[in-house]
Image (tube, coloured by chain):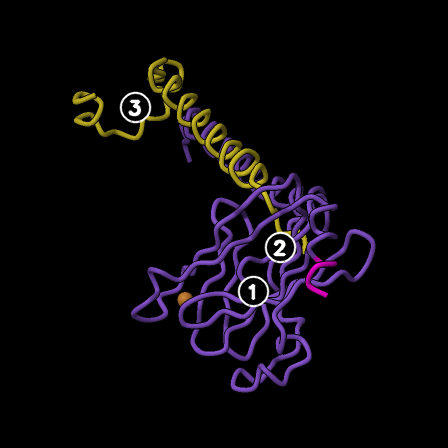
Chain colours: A purple, B yellow
Amino acid sequence: MHIHAYEKLWLALSIVLILALIGTVTYGAVGPGVAMVADSQSTVDPGALDEDDRFSEPRVEQVGENEYEAYVVAYQFGFEPTPIVVPANSTVTLHVTSRDVIHGFEVAGTSANAMAVPGEVSEITVETDEPTEYGIVCNEYCGAGHHVMEGKLNVVSQSEFENRGGDSE
Amino acid sequence: MGQSEAVNAPTDDVGGDGEEFDPIGTLTLIGIYFTILVLAWVYIYFIEFLGRDLVVVG
Ligand SMILES: [Cu+2]
C-alpha cells in the first residue's frame, strides 16, 4: 500500500499528540495532584439534614494545622453558610449537599466546581492562596429562582479568620 | 491533478514514486495545524486549567 509521506507524517504527529494529551493529564494527576469528586462520602437523608452531624450546622471548622472542613448546604435558592469564610494559604475540604433538588456549586472563575445532589455529599479539597472574595453560582437549573441563586466564598487572612471565630463563639 | 486522475493505471502509482507531488504549501499547513493544536492544548491545560485558583486536589 502506498501512503504519501505527508500522510505518514500526520499519522505520526497524531500519535505524538495523543501521547502528549495522556502525558499532560497524567502529569496533572501526579504533579499538582488534580483530583475529581469521588463517591467516598457516606450518604445523608436530605429531609433530615438538621439532624445530621455534618450538615445540621453548615459551617467551617478547623481540623488540623492549616486544614479546614467546610459543610455547605445548597437549597432553593441559596447556599449555607453565606458567606463561606476560610483562611488564606490553607487546605480546605468542602462538603456540599442539597436539601431539596439538584444544585450546582461553582466557585466562579476557579476550578472548584461540584454538583450538590440531595442525599449525596460532594467532597472537594482545594488550597487557598491570598485573601480574596469569590462568588458562588448554582450551575444546575433548579427552579424559578435559579438565576438569583448565589453564594460567597471569602478567603480572609489567618488573623482575620481567628478574630472572626473568637467573636462568634 | 486532473491528468493523474484520468490516468488511473496502477503502473503509474508504482512508477510515480520518484516524482511524487510534494507541495511545500501542504507541508506548511500541516505544520501550522499541528502547532495550533499543541499551543491550544498547552494554553487550555497549563494556563487556563492549572493556572486557575482553587485547583481541586482531593
Ligand atoms: Cu440551585
Kindly identify which chain the residue marked by label 3 belongs to: B
The number of numbered discs placed on residues in the rendered structure image is 3
- The residue type indicated by label 3 comes to Asp
Q: Identify the mark at residue A81; answer none if there is no mark.
A: 1
- Tell me whether circle 2 and circle 1 mark residues in contact (CB < 8 Å): yes
Location of residue A159 in the rendering, given as x and y in whole percent from the top left corner: 74, 46
> What residue is disc 3 on?
B12
Q: Distance between the Cα atoms at labels 2 and 1?
A: 9 Å
Q: Distance between the Cα atoms at labels 3 and 1?
A: 76 Å
- In the displayed structure image, the side of residue B6 where residue A53 appears, left or right: right
Location of residue A95 in the rendering, given as x and y in whole percent from the top left corner: 62, 66
- Asked whether the residues under marks 3 and 1 belong to the same chain, the reply is no
Q: What is the crowding at mark 2: few (fewer than 14 residues within 10 Å), some, or many (at least 20)?
A: some
> What residue is disc 2 on?
A85
- In the displayed structure image, the side of residue A10 where residue A40 appears, left or right: right
Location of residue A167 in the rendering, given as x and y in whole percent from the top left corner: 70, 59
Which residues are the magenta region? A165-169
